[in-house]
Structure formats: structure tokens, C-alpha cells
Amino acid sequence: MAEPLFELLAPHFDSQPASRPRPSAQAATTTDFLARLSSLRLSTLATTEPQSLQQSSYSALLSLQALSTRSQRAIIEASEHLSVLSTTLPALAEETETLHHAIPELDEEAARFSRAYGKTAENPLLDRRKTAMLLSRNVERLSDILDLPSLLSSAISASSASPISAATSAPQSLSTSAASYASALDLDGHIKRLHTLYPQSALISSVSDQAEQAMRGMTTNLIGTLRAPGIKLAGAIRTIGWLRRVAPELDESGGLGIHGGQEGGLGALFLVCRLANLVSMLDALEPLRELADQESRKRRQDMDKQKDDWSGGQQTERYLKRYIEIFREQSFAIISMYRSIFPSPTAEIGTVGVGSKSGPKAGAKPSQADPLQPLPSALSTFPLHLVELLVSTLRRYMPNVKDKASRESLLTQVLYCAGSLGRLGADFSILLALLEEDGSDIDGEGESQEEADGRMEWAEVMKKHRVLASRLELLASGVSGGSQDASDTSRKPAVAG
């Protein structure tokens, strides 16, 4: 029934505008509409159906207008995309074909990259990247290593800020300096261990070089501490212990320690530093020495004019008293401190003077490797140098002092100095006789009876000194009213010495 109706209505389709397409007879919409028309009455078709169609058309028009209002932009974009779809699809197909042909080449390049940059491959670029990654992971450790020289320098600077106070037993300064030096030595030991573990590392070698320069500065500071004016025994022992660790090349004893009986080069270094301090203290008497030199020139002028009424020497006496006092205190301190720091049961100083002998003890076996070993202690000749320093000064300035009481006072002071060193085995009182002979030779050849008596002045002074010393010994021992026998007993070994 639908097909006859469609054929009946077909001429009307041909009269429609070309913009409206002709409906298809096989379309579901067309079939449903024709089936509905066949089911209606004729009166309905003539009266209500046209109105129903107009109403449906109007509703569809409103729906289309609302849809176009809501979806205007999307429709326009869809229309534009649809217009270019005809050119895009061929281009997509062409690119797909190109990709299809490029996949084998891509696979080959991926395989080559895998072979070149694999974990088992050797590649310089890959090695540099691994090194960079390793550096990135250990940047904190490397930063700590690079900070070691600056930390070492800071510790040394803190310890050397007040070396004199640290050596003179100021409690707070001494503890601070000791802690700083101990930290510096620990840091240096850590750097040396790193250099031993990684000898090929340029970074470790650079850090080791910087640490070595800093430790040389620390060695200089320690040597300067040994030259401090008021150094104490505890500070000196501590300083020598630090030097043994900082400069082991100075310790020729092979690290036997302070109680090993060998001081190596540290003993000589200690004596040289303390001698430099003694010389600097004696040089501080320059104003008094200049006055003594003026008196020496005046005395020579009077001798040239053959004047025998020289009565000067007061300034020389002041200079010599101060000189002998400083010499006695410092020389005793140097030798006693040395023997406390470097105790040697086999090395004895011996008495300084004519006929003194030194050598190895009986029964000692010489070294098989070197017949010159063991070397004598640095202290074996140091007292001779000290005494020569004092005697040369006395020879130069004693002729200026003509007053008997002043000369006896000076000689007594020298005897006290000799006795002080004699407690350490370096008595030089016998050299006073040579001093008097040299003084008489300097003054002139012709001597009167008074001058001949003056040559024995040293003997009289020594006798008085012995008597006074024996009395002091008796008083110290608690014996009352010293007897002649006790006095004789105390004099005999002294005169024999």
C-alpha cells in the first residue's frame, strides 16, 4: 500500500525546489509516514492532517532554530573540519606510509644506541656521565674534604693566636691552645690517611699539599713558642711532644719518646731557641752596655795618658750585675728544663773546665752499623758555649771595675752562678783564675806588688764563698755553732773541685 501512495505523490516531489532533496521510498521515515496515511480516514486526511503536518513542521523549525542557537559554534567548526577532511585524510595516509617505512630504521638506531650506551659498553661520554653522577652523589663528602685545609688553618691560627700565653701556663689559654693543636694534628693525620688510601687522586694530592704548607706554619709557630720568654716546663714538654708529631724528621731517635734516652734534633732545636731567648734578654741591656762601653773608652784613654787614678766603673758594675743575674737564671732554667724534657741516663754533662772528659761508659758496645753512633747529646757542649758567653763579657768589662768591694761582689755573684750550674754538673768556678790572668795581661805587662796581690783576688773570693756556703749548709742541716772540723770537711772537696 505504501508503494502506490509513494508513486502517487512522486509528481509532487518533482515540483519541489532543488534545494530540497527527494525522499527515498526505502527510507524508514517515508515508509512509516505512508503507513500512517493509509490508516487514516479520508475526512481526517482532508481536515486534521494538514494542520497536524503544519504543526509538526513548525515544531521541527523551532527545534532547529534552538539547536542552531545552542550549537552554532560547534556546527561551524564541524563544517570547517568536514571541509578540510577531504585533504587531511590523504595527508594522514601519506604520513602513515612514511612512518611505516621509517620504523625499521628507527628500530636499527635504537639497537645501535643500546649497544653504544649499554651498561657493559665502553664509551667516553658514558664514562663522563657516570663520573658526573658519582660526583653529584658524593658532593657533600667532597665538600668536607675540600674544607679540611681551611679547618686545619683555622685550628693552627687559633692555637697560634697567643703562643706566649699558651706556653706560660695560663690555664684557659693553655687548654685552648692544646685543644687547637690536638685538632690540627688529628686533621693532618686524617689527610695523610686519605693520601695513603688514594695516592692517585689529584684532589687528595692538592689537599695534602695545602695541609703540608699549613703544618709547616704550625712548626714555625711551635718553634716560636720555644723562644717565648716565660716558657714553663709543662708548656715546653707539650710543645716538644707536638713537634715530635708535626716534624718527625727532627726526631732522629726513631720515635722512642721522651723517655727513650735520645733527643734527636729536637734537643739541639730546644737549646738553640732558648739560647736565642737568652741573647735577646741580654741584648735588652743595651743602654747599660753603652754606658759600660763609654767607661771602657775613658779607661783606655787614661791608660794611654799613663794615669793611675781611674775610679770609674759604676755603670759597668750595674751592667755586669744585671747581666750575671739574667745569665744565672736563664742558664739554670735552660739546662734543668732540657734535662727534664730529654732525660738520658747514659749522657752526663760533666764538669766544665780544664781536664774535663766525656765519653761512653765503660763496657758500652759501639754500634756495628756506624762507629760514630751514638752521637753525643747536644747538651754536652752547650754549657761551654754559655760559659764562654759569660767569660767573654767579664773579660771585656771587669777591668773597668777597680773598687775591691765591687769586684768581690761581682766575683761572688759569678761564683753563685757557677754553683747554680754546678748543681747540674756544669761548674765553671775554676775559670775565674784564667779570667784574672787574662785581665792582668790586658791591663799591661809591668805589675806592682799590689797588682800581683790582685791576681789572687779570685782565690780570696772563692775562700770567702766556700766559708759562707759551708755555714749556710750547717744552718740548713740544723747543726748549731759550726765546728772547725765540720768546716774543714766541707772545704776540702770544694777546693779540690
Image (spheres, helix red, strand yellow):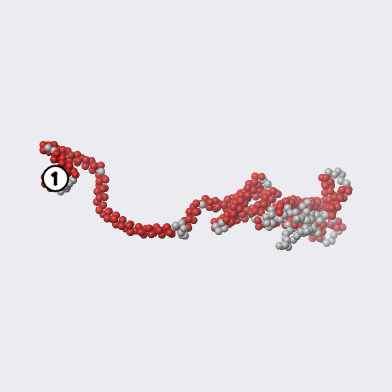
- Which residue lies under the disc numbered 1? 3
Q: Residue at x 83, y 61 (%)?
A: 445
> In the visual, does 466 lie left or right of 102?
right
Whole-percent x and y of residue 486?
87, 48
135 vs 52, nearest the viewer = 52
Whole-percent x and y of residue 213?
60, 56
Q: Residue at x 46, y 56 (%)?
A: 119
Query: Which quarter of the rendered picture does the C terminus lie within?
Result: bottom right
> In the visual, does 374 lie left or right of 149?
right
438 vs 121, nearest the viewer = 121
Q: In the image as oriented, which residue stretches furthest toward the front?
A: 1
Camera sees residue 241: yes
Residue 35, by quadrant, is top left
Whole-percent x and y of residue 71?
25, 43
Whole-percent x and y of residue 224?
66, 53
Query: Which quarter of the rendered picture does the N terminus lie within?
Result: top left
